[in-house]
Image: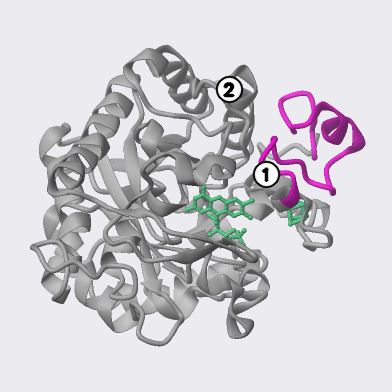
Amino acid sequence: MTDTTEIDPTKTEVAPLFEPLELGPRTAHNRIMQAPMSVSYGHADGSVSAKEIEHYGRRAQGGVGVVFTENFAVNLAGRQMPLQTVISEEHLPGLRKLADEVHGHGSLAVVQIVHSGRYAGPWDEYESRRRLAPSAVPFELTPGRTVTPQEMTEEEIEESIEAFVHAAQICERAGFDGVDVHAAQGFLISGFLSPRTNHRTDQWGGSFENRVRFASEVVRRITAGTGQDFIVGVHLLSDELIEDGWTIEDAVRLAPLLEAAGAHFLFAIPATFETLRLPANQGLMNRQGYAMADSKALAGAVSIPIIANGRLGGPADMVKALVETNVSAVALARAIFVDPDWPRKVAAGANDSIRACPCDPPRCLRTQLTGSICGHWPTSAQERGHLGYDERTL
Ligand SMILES: Cc1cc2nc3c(=O)[nH]c(=O)nc-3n(C[C@H](O)[C@H](O)[C@H](O)COP(=O)(O)O)c2cc1C
Ligand code: SF4
């Protein structure tokens, strides 16, 4: 292992990455974060597995300031993936172990909470139960397969908001530092934002004020229902990237309302699963800095930290982003997945030893349903199905 103890990164050119960051009531020890990345290492019954605990512990050990978990479902109706963790009272012991493991390595631990809405699984039985959405708008679930979710009743809307609050409270009791509300990618909350998927005529649809009510209520009620030292942030759909959809101007208008509702940080997340398939948006996730313009736009509208994400390039690009723009931190998904020691290597000036993510082939996406594997891990990790404490990349 490279000895990282003698170098003080705060005295080098990468110093901006290693300054502490206040996220509302708590402080991250640096500005490099593990972005939420669905790897499906949980149990089929929705409980937390030992593999999951080791996976996130290993990322914390690599030196990130914050570990964001992948999206954990707020209830069974909001679950998308067959091995996705579901937040519930019964799963509290496993959640507690997960928070403890991450804290043991000095990182903050934040759970991303989601209701998948019209993307809820299992997809092979899509028509057999209610799939919740603001409106019954048909969409292409998988290439060539169009399905229609159901329009939520007022009661279901109320229950779903409360499910977010209850899930956040469970995370707080488990010892996590906060939650990150998933309001992007086409999941339930972002479905309310978009005029394409929200055709309601009641207080939850129609005008901008009505379409953003669900997102604002979730943040407001979580803030009210958890302690003052609990972090609440939002992954916000920044632009649907489709005609007649939610735009960056809408997101810039919503951001201060989320801040007023109590949000401590925001991510800007362009596109949804649906619009990523449009010819103009294909390959978006591999374009360097694809969310930077939106991140900067949000940063201009609020005083809370904006966490940049989306193929951010190398350490020098990230330092430049922090120094020259108004974003406060960087979050890495694939780069930390392929090489959890990324932060320690950058701190030690050992950039040459960083295991790159060339995205060729993006095996982590193809293996996502059964447990993500990276084709660029050491062979032992690929064979075991995850890169944990036994595999060093230094
Ligand atoms: C396999 C995979 C799973 C992902 N799962 C999530 C998720 O659970 N929640 C989320 O908000 N974003 C998720 N993302 C998006 C990432 O957080 C991130 O925004 C995107 O990968 C771009 O960052 P990167 O270039 O550092 O990978 C996922 C991305 C990948 C590749
Ligand atoms: S499988 Fe490819 S895209 Fe995924 S983390 Fe590994 S190198 Fe990156």
Circle 2 packing at 10 Å, graded few (<14), some (14-19), many (20+), is some
Residue 72 place in picture, x, y as percent: 44, 37
Left or right: 85, with 378 as reference point: left
Whether ligand 1 has any atom under 8 Å from the Cβ at mark 1 is answered as yes
Task: Kindly identify which residue carries mark 1.
Answer: 368
Left or right: 57, with 187 as reference point: right
Task: Kindly identify which residue carries mark 2.
Answer: 43
- Can you say whether 354 is above or below 230 in the image? below
Residue 239 place in picture, x, y as percent: 40, 76
Residue 119 place in picture, x, y as percent: 46, 51
Mark 1, secondary structure of its residue: loop
- Can you say whether 254 is above or below 393 in the image? below
Q: Quadrant of the C terminus?
A: top right
User: What residue is drawn where x is 38% and y is 16%?
Assistant: 92
Residue 292 place in picture, x, y as percent: 48, 76
Circle 1 packing at 10 Å, graded few (<14), some (14-19), many (20+), is some
User: What residue is drawn where x is 70% and y is 52%?
Assistant: 365
Residue 349 appears in view? yes
Extent of the magenta region: 366-394
**Of callouts 2 and 1, which one flags the residue occurring earlier in the amino acid sequence?**
2
Viewer-nearest residue: 224 or 72? 72
